[in-house]
Amino acid sequence: MATDIINLDHHATTAVPPAVWDAMRAAPPGNSSSGHSLGRVARRAFDEAKERVAARLGAHPDEVLFTSGATESNNIAIFGAPPGPVAAGPIEHSCVTEPLKSLARRGEPVTWLPVAADGTTIVSDLTDDLKLVAVMLVNHETGAIQPVVPAGPWRWHCDAAQAVGKLPVNFQEMGATTLSASGHKFGAPPGIGILLIRRGVTLRPLTFGGPHQQGRRPGTEPVAFAVGLATALDLSCDAMEHRRPHVASLKARLIENLAACAGTVVVNSPERSSPYVVNVSFPGLRADQLLMAFDTAGVACSAGPACSSGTVQVSAGLQAMGMPEERLRSAIRFSFSAAQTRAEIDEAGRRIERAVRHLRR
Ligand code: PLP
C-alpha cells in the first residue's frame, strides 16, 4: 500500500482550509435564540452568515435555510412540496431519487425523465400537470452540466451540490424555486448545507419544534457551522475564476495520461462538463478490481453509487445514458482539487497505468 496517497476523489468531500476552522473557532458561543446579549451576538453572526451566502449565490438572505447538508436540503424540498406529480432524471443523486421512490411507493405519480447519451436530462417534454421537477446542476458522476428547467406551472428543485463553490451559481437568474448545496463539497466541514427557497414559496417542514429559521427547520441554529460555510463559500467564490482553468488543465492532463494506458480507455464525461471531475471506463476490467488496484497503487478515486464488501453497484445514472455493459461495469470517477499540481496528476497517471497493465496481463 502506497503511503503517499494521491486523492482523486474530491467530489466525495473536500479539505477544510485553516481559515474556515479559524472562523468557526472565533464564532460566538451563545444560542442565537436566547434573549440576552450573548444570544444577540450569536444571532448577528448567524444572520451575517445568511447575508454572505445570499450575496454569493444571487439570493435574498431570507431565502437561505441552513441544513445539515444537501441530503437534508433535497429531502425538505421534495417532501415539503405540495403533493402531486413529480418528474426527475434517473441521474440525480440517491438523496433525490430515493425520496422520489418513497413518494412513488405511497402512490404519488413519479415520472423518470429520459437522459441523453451525453448524460443530460431531457426537459423538453414536461407536462403541465407536474407540481415539481427535480433537475440537478452538475452531475456527481460524470460532471455533465444539466439544462435549465423551463418556466412552467411546476416548481424546479435544483440540487447544486457539485456546482456551488466551483462554478458560478445565481439563484435569481436561474429561476429555480429551490436549490440545495453542501458545505463539505467546497471547503466547509461535513454537517452543514444550504437550501435556498424562493420568496413566497412554502414548504412543509419535515421536523417540528421551535420557531428557528422561520419554522422551516426547527432546532438550535448551527452558528459556528454557518459561519464556516459562509467563509468557505467566500474563499471558493473569490478563487473560482483562477481555479477553474487550472483544474481544467489537470483534468485534460489526466485524460491524456490515461490514453497511454494499456488497452482502451473511454471517457464517459461529455465535453460540457465540470472541470472538477472525469468519468472513465476501462472496458474488459471491473470497477471493483480497478478501485482496489488503484487504492493499492496509492490513488484514491470512486466507482458506482455504493460500494460494499468490495462490490460496486452499476450506476443507474450511467445506465440511463445507454452505456454498453462493458463500459458500465468498468466506470471510475476521478475528481480534482485546485490545490493539486500537474506533477501529482502525472504521478497518478503512472500509477494508474501500471495498475491497469497489471490487471490486463
Ligand atoms: N447531491 C449531490 C449531487 C452530491 O454529489 C452529494 C454528495 O455526494 C449530495 C447531494 C449529498 O450531499 P451531503 O453529503 O451534503 O448530504
Image (cartoon, rainbow, N blue to C red):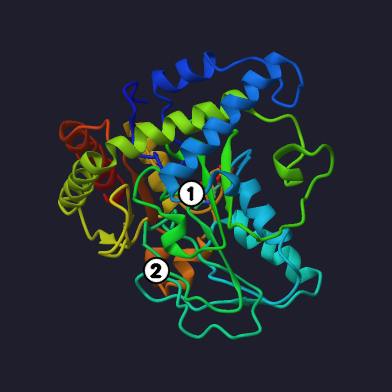
In the rendered image, is residue 337 in sight?
A: no
Label 1 is placed on what type of residue?
Ala
- Label 1 vs 2, first from the N-terminus: 2
Q: Identify which residue, 53 or 285, lies in the foreground.
A: 53
In the image, 296: left or right of 183?
left
| Residue position marked by numbered label 2 in the rendering | 119
Q: Identify which residue, 307 or 95, lies in the foreground.
A: 95
Q: Position of residue 250 (x, y in %)?
A: 21, 43
CB of residue at label 2: within 8 Å of ligand 1?
no
In the image, 208: left or right of 23?
right
Query: Which quadrant is the N terminus positioned in?
Result: top left
CB of residue at label 1: within 8 Å of ligand 1?
yes
Q: Of discs 1 and 2, which sits in the foreground?
A: 1
As drawn, the label of residue 161 is 1
Q: Dot 1 surroundings within 10 Å: few (below 14), some, or many (20 or more)? A: many
Q: Identify which residue, 221 or 301, lies in the foreground.
A: 221
Q: For residue 323, which quarter of the picture?
A: bottom left
Q: Identify which residue, 313 or 111, lies in the foreground.
A: 111
Q: Dot 2 surroundings within 10 Å: few (below 14), some, or many (20 or more)? A: many
Q: Is residue 131 above or below residue 40?
A: below
Q: Position of residue 31 (x, y in %)?
A: 71, 21
